[in-house]
Image: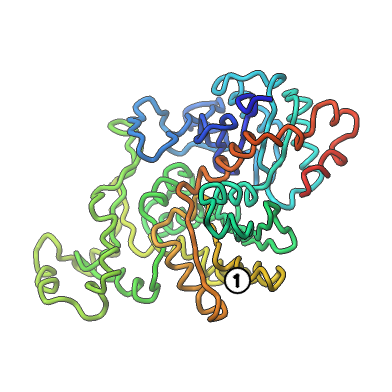
Amino acid sequence: MSSTNVVVLDNGGGLIKAGFGGERDPAVILPNCLYRAPSSKKWLHPHPLPITTTSTDSSAAEPDLTSAAVRRPLDRGYLINSDLQREIWSHLFSSILRINPTQSSLLVTEPLFTLPSIQRSLDELVFEDFNFRALYVADSPSLVHLYEASRRPDGLVSRAQCSLVVDCGFSFTHASPVFQNFTLNYGVKRIDLGGKALTNYLKELVSFRSVNVMEETFLIDDVKEKLCFVSLDVPRDLRLARESGKENLFRCTYVLPDGITYTKGFVKHPERIHNYLALKDGTCGFPPLPEETKGNMNRPEIAEMPQDRNRIDLSKNEFDLTNERFLVPEMIFQPANLGMNEAGLAECIVRAVNSCHPHLHPVLYESIILTGGSTLFPQFSERLEKELRPLVPDDYHVKITTQEDPILGVWRGGSLLASSPDFEAMCVTKSEYEELGSARCRKRFFH
């Protein structure tokens, strides 16, 4: 079986990454949803996204997604609407990938701890609706481990065949120990927070303080991805966020689409996005301020009256973000601050490691791999190491590696597995499924 006949499908709650085994990058990245504009009665498929972040797609032909309603086949990571998923996959296979499922095999990802009833729904989709000739179901952590081990054959992950994969995805965050390419399910710990919850929290903050954006899912996703970052010192940054004028390193303005001149929002002064990085140098600490900076505050274009700060101009088509930029990603590290009865990410990792054999502890702490879109927040790994180090024994090293592309890491591991000579023997064929049923076939995947 040629690897080009294997379709690799990372079926995430937010994005689908799809392509062919043996390739480095997927053929398409597609939002796993349907949308409907307020002016339309028809549910439409979103446009594919650019594969690389360096793509200069003008997006002139993109539809106006302002206030668009969204339907997703997955909720909290799990398949709840197989009819909707069938419609999305049908569009993907026939119109974008242009494949014949009856002559192809499928490698698809599935969340950890998926219920048997949901597993049956997926198997029915693959074999009965699309008639794929063979199926392999993988979990994300094992694919990430496989890809990272192959990238660095002399590295610790490859030599020890052991790693701790931290996957901050769309629906939730997992800390998963992987040993010899198998995820140790008894050691997996989960936080019920992901990219969707962060977007919803940002919606609430902006709607409460500035403009009602509770229906603007795509727009606030864009705000989050462009402006949010992880704070290395939250109390200090909260104080700095109250400053006026140029002393406030965090203030950024986001311009909303007007539906006429432009249909996508944008950051008004993009050069200000990374001003907060000056805090790393210690040059902009609080409370001491440089003399030249104090003088700048008297300039008329910077001065801001306290009574103006709380006044909201409802005619303006823009809003400012200050402390929202770091309070949103802060949820992952301190969910208790929002009233959630959940451990933060650092404690989650420690609990996952402590669930494994003591001989694995030093190796796991030294081979932490970050994947998933929410790990793309600037300063994410630095903050995690800062919180994790006090919780780890002094004689253990802590090493955190972020994947070169956290969004594509799982798919690349699947592509590598699909191109291996043993892949065909690992799959369940359509005839085996028809003879034995879903439950017995699933035992082959060791999940």
As rendered, which of 186 and 318 lies closer to the eye?
186
Query: Can you give x and y, in whole percent of width and height, for residue 379 in the image?
Result: 40, 62
Q: Which residue is most to the front?
A: 154
Q: Residue 9: name its quadrant.
A: top right
User: Does residue 229 appear left or right of residue 155 in this picture?
Assistant: left
Q: Foreground: 61 or 444?
A: 444
Q: Name the residue at 42% across, 34% down.
A: 50
Residue 356 appears in which quarter of the rendering? bottom right
Query: Where 217 falls versus 374 (above or below)?
Result: above
Vertically, is 34 above or below 98? below
Which quadrant, please, contains the N terminus? top right
Residue at (49, 57) in percent of width and height: 201
Q: How many marks?
A: 1
Above or below: residue 183 compared with residue 413 = below
Percent coordinates x, y for residue 390 in the rendering: 51, 79
**Can you identify the residue that label 1 sits on?**
362
Circle 1: is it few (<14), some (14-19), or many (20+) Cα within 10 Å? some
The image position of residue 184, as x and y in percent, is: 72, 59
Task: Find numbered disc 1 in the image and state the secondary structure of the residue it sits on.
Answer: helix
- Give the side of residue 341 with respect to residue 298, left or right: right
User: Which residue does the image show at 38% across and 76% down from the upper left?
Assistant: 235
Name which quarter of the figure residue 350 lies in: bottom right
Give residue 392's position: percent from left, percent from top. 56, 77
Give, as a three-letter code, the residue at label 1: Pro
26 sits to left or right of 265: right
Q: How is the image coloured?
A: rainbow
